[in-house]
Amino acid sequence: MACKATYSNVDIIEPGQEEPWGSEPREKAAVSDVYTEEESQYETADPAVGARRRPMEQREARAPEWEWRLGQRWILACATVLGVSVLLNLLLLTLGVVRLFLNTAAMTWPRPLVMFPSPADMETASTLERMQVENQLLRNVGSPASGFFLIYSESHQLCVDVTAGGSLTAAPCTPGAPSQHFQWLSQGQLLSVAHQQCVAVPKRLNRMAVRLEPCKAHRELQHWECRANGLLALAKENLYFNYGNSQSHVVMLYTGDGPWSRWVVYGSHEDLCSCACHVCTPCRRGWTFFQDRCYFHSCSLGTWDTANRSCASLGALLLQVTSFAEQAHIVASMKAPSSWMGLTDQALEGAWMWVDGTHSAANASYWQTGEPNGGQKENCALARQDGHWYDAPCTEQHHWVCEGEL
């Protein structure tokens, strides 16, 4: 009976209680009672155990839905992380491209790319622009020496012509040929317009061939003077510019003062000195001439570096003073209170050097007493109207003087 109480859905048949074979209705009833529900044959009849199993079954039924939602959250989180990573990579790639562009621009352009120029940069750019305009005007102007003319021999009806080698010969007159154009310079020098050199002779000798050489104001064998009846003589000598009695018609010095030594301006009967110029120089307009050199005093203000670049663009150098006479000429021609010179010790403190790389000679310097005294803060030299030199910061704004050859 104890077992029967425990397993209520199982009929226990005790010995001696078997029913006869003919009791069919009872058997069917028993079968019906046993299989009314699909339960385990050994399901406990304890209500507490059954109550605990039902919540577990409900949780197990809800588990697939919870796991699916959790999976969705993980997928969303991964997608978000992936999207942020892609955006960061795109941003880094863009920054890299921009940096590459800026680096390329910095190597390609003459000046660094400045997105927002400072007032100092704008002022420097304005100075350089004015300087370039000024320099272009100077380059466009030729020598202002006397208007060119042709040297004509009425006796032979030929004009003086300059060969490619620099020799002077007599040839048929061609007014449009630059090789036949001449100009008077100051102090009686004759300039060949085509070659920008002066008519000269190497020695004071009869029958010495006349030729061209670089203009040098102090060289006496480049100076000519007019005499009566169209004679053109070497200065202070009775040696005349002569047609030359030779097959090649080479112009030479000659002691004779006959018709072959007489010259006039082509197209007129006036002697050559009628076109003479006593103030003309072989330098470009705006430049001054002194001892075979040309000097330009700027109209603009600029730093030492700006001045140096300005002179270089004109084919000249920032001023280099090498003699007392040159220093006196610069001071006499200065219009500004001070001007930059091509003297600096930026490379090595205390070692003052000219822009062409040569050292400043102690016996050819004109420092004011106590100068230079600026140390590393003042590394560029100024010439002032008082005739002395001063050191100053290279970034200061001053006029400057350029010096060039003829």
Image (tube, helix red, strand yellow):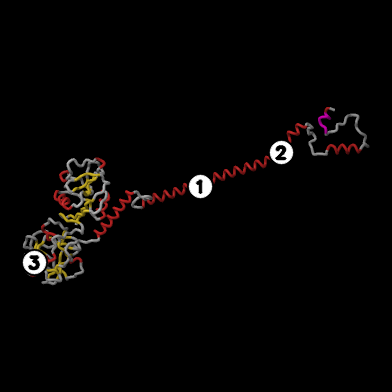
Residue denoted by label 3: 231
Bounds of the magenta segment: 3-8
> x%, y% of residue 315?
24, 55
Mark 3 Cα-neighbour bin, 10 Å: few <14, some 14–19, many ≥20: many
Report the residue marked by disc 1: 87
Q: Position of residue 78 (x, y in %)?
A: 57, 44
Residue where numbered disc 2 is placed: 58
Category of crowding for the residue at label 1, using alpha-carbon neighbours closer than 10 angstroms: few (below 14), some (14–19), many (at least 20): few
Q: Is residue 270 magenta?
A: no
Mark 1 / mark 2, whichever is N-terminal: 2
Q: Which of pointers 2 and 3 lies earlier in the amino acid sequence?
A: 2
Going by the numbered disc 2, the residue's amino acid type is Gln
Left or right for 146, reference 80: left
Vertical order, 292 against 27 (above or below) = below
Q: CA distance from mark 2 to mark 3?
A: 138 Å
For image coordinates 90% across by 30% down, the residue present is 17
The front one of 358 and 378 is 378
